[in-house]
Image: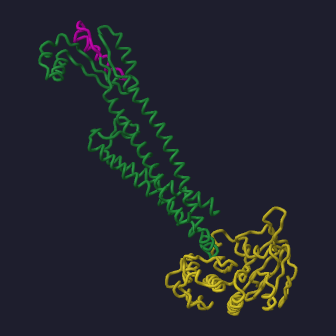
Chain colours: A yellow, B green
Amino acid sequence: MPQIEFINVSKEYDPGKKVLDDVTFKVEPGEFMFVVGPSGAGKSTIIKLLTKEETPEVGDILFNGESILNILKESVPDLRRKIGVVFQDFRLLDSKTVFDNVAVALEVADSSLEEIRSIVPNVLNMVGLTEKMFKYPKQLSGGEKQKVAIARALAHEPDVILADEPTGMIDPDSVDDVLEVLEKINSLGTTILMATHDQEIVNAMKKRVLRIERGQVISDKKGGKYRA
Amino acid sequence: MSNVKKEKLLSVSNILIMTITFVLLGLLINIVVFSQTALRYLEDQAQVTVFFKDDFTEDKISAMKDGLSKDKRVSALVYVSKEDALRIFREINKDEPVLLESVSASILPASLEVRAGNISNLKPLAEELKVVDGVEEVRYFEDVVSRFKFWSTIVYIVGTLLVLIFLVVSYSVVIAALRTTINSKGVEFEIMKIVGASDDYVKLPLIHQGVFFGLFSSFIASVIMILLGVGVTLANIFPKGLGLGFLPGIFMPPWIFSIILTFILLLSGFLLGYLGSSAAIKKYLNY
């Protein structure tokens, strides 16, 4: 059973202007897939549809075989705990330490203090930030900030990580570090869906590439390449 | 100005405006209850006094009294003979012996005090009694009661309008204060939602903030109103107690009224804070 399935999905924010147009694809558990395309192609919309921030006008989206569209409002938080999201701008809280930024994900799920104290160091260890646990975001490099965001996304042990241009705001030297962390997480069984328009990264990683332009799927190739 | 400073300033102004609102609400309720109580006291004492001519004998007055006692509008009748009148006169003027020497029972008129169950019946009773044979004069204090009623109505209307205006202002200020909180914590709320916070997890602290504003302000207002109540009790302005709503003849101790008023103010504070914060969340957080 595919982990994620888009079935003839169309989405428009303004009437008559389709951001996604009849998009169909499947993602198997444990896959690493790039969603590529120019700005405004609809990459971020795919992520918003998966986290139910947005709803499509047409089509269906299945997650672990169940339609996301039928999920009740009260159950959306449960869905979001199974899908970790990483953003280009990190979305960290400057007033909280690295530890507390990751702990937020567990606090909102009413995890106990013991759970928080055990899970947070584990995920920070996984992304290689154990030593920076009590630093504040302002004391970190761009790459480190993104690793904190990845650690936060990992806190609930999600089935999938959605990464929306995760290397877009970090220095070139840190890009490899972040990608390495994502690959490591993927190797442990977590599905990764990464939206990017960075052809160097896509071509170097040799993963499945889903190319979207003007809201439509142009190509879908394993070990594919991307030329902007 | 930074969001934190703005938030603090708005919180203080919010509590101040809400406290003024609740003090006004408390004062309005006090004015209504005190004036109703005063009216009850006045009505209890409002009466028509019928003075008789000297040639109208006690038998005739007694017959008239019997007739009036069957009238449903009349609640009580007290006959004051010439001798009773002299006794009352002496009591009132006991410090003026010269005046007392010159007055005897024969020059004072006998009278009948007629009390009505309903104050509005005083005027027709007075009109009817004026034309009865043997009646010298009829007195009653219609003006005092009706003027009191008129002015207390004006005070109710103005007070209610003031309270309504302040309720609207307080409601808007609660929304403005929470809007600043929401703006300053916008990223935090967004992160919470994206990492799987339930709606309540995000909304409840804001609701608590609004309810805190309401309850804290109404608590301050309640303390002020309780102190006012203590003052009224110590001054013994209403020895029989305070009128219970608009029900005639029923009075309650001031401390019971203070408890009821505190409850009303705290409930209003809770509702204003809850409704204001709910509106702000709906408007600015899209819940």
The answer to whether B270 is drawn above or below residue B244 in the figure is below
Q: Which residues are magenta?
A: B50-73
A56 is higher (above) or lower (below) than A153: above
Q: What's the residue at 85%, 76% (across, down)?
A: A213
Residue A221 x/y as whole percent: 85, 87
Residue A112 shows in the view: yes
Task: Please say if A94 is above or below B23.
Answer: below
Which of A26/B162 is in front? B162
Residue A187 placement: quadrant? bottom right
Corner quadrant of residue B109: top left
Does the magenta-highlighted stretch encompass residue B52?
yes
Tell me if residue A73 comes above or below residue B13 in the rendering: below
Q: Position of residue A112 (x, y in %)?
A: 51, 81
Query: What is the x, y in percent for residue B281?
Result: 59, 61
Q: Position of residue B37 (x, y in %)?
A: 35, 36
Q: Quadrant of the N terminus of chain A?
A: bottom right
- Residue B93 as seen in the image, left or right of residue A96: left
| Residue drawn at the location 45% of the way across and 49% of the way down | B20
Outermost residue on the right side: it is: A218
User: Residue A157: in sight, yes or no?
Assistant: no
Task: Say which of B70 and B212 sits in front.
Answer: B212
Looking at the image, residue A106 sits to the left or right of residue B21; the answer is: right
Q: Residue furthest front?
A: B1
Residue drawn at 46 percent across, 40 percent down: B159
Is residue B93 left or right of B44 when viewed as pictured?
A: left
Q: Which quadrant does the C terminus of chain A fall into?
A: bottom right
Is residue B200 on the magenta stretch? no
Could you say which quadrant of the image residue A212 lies in? bottom right
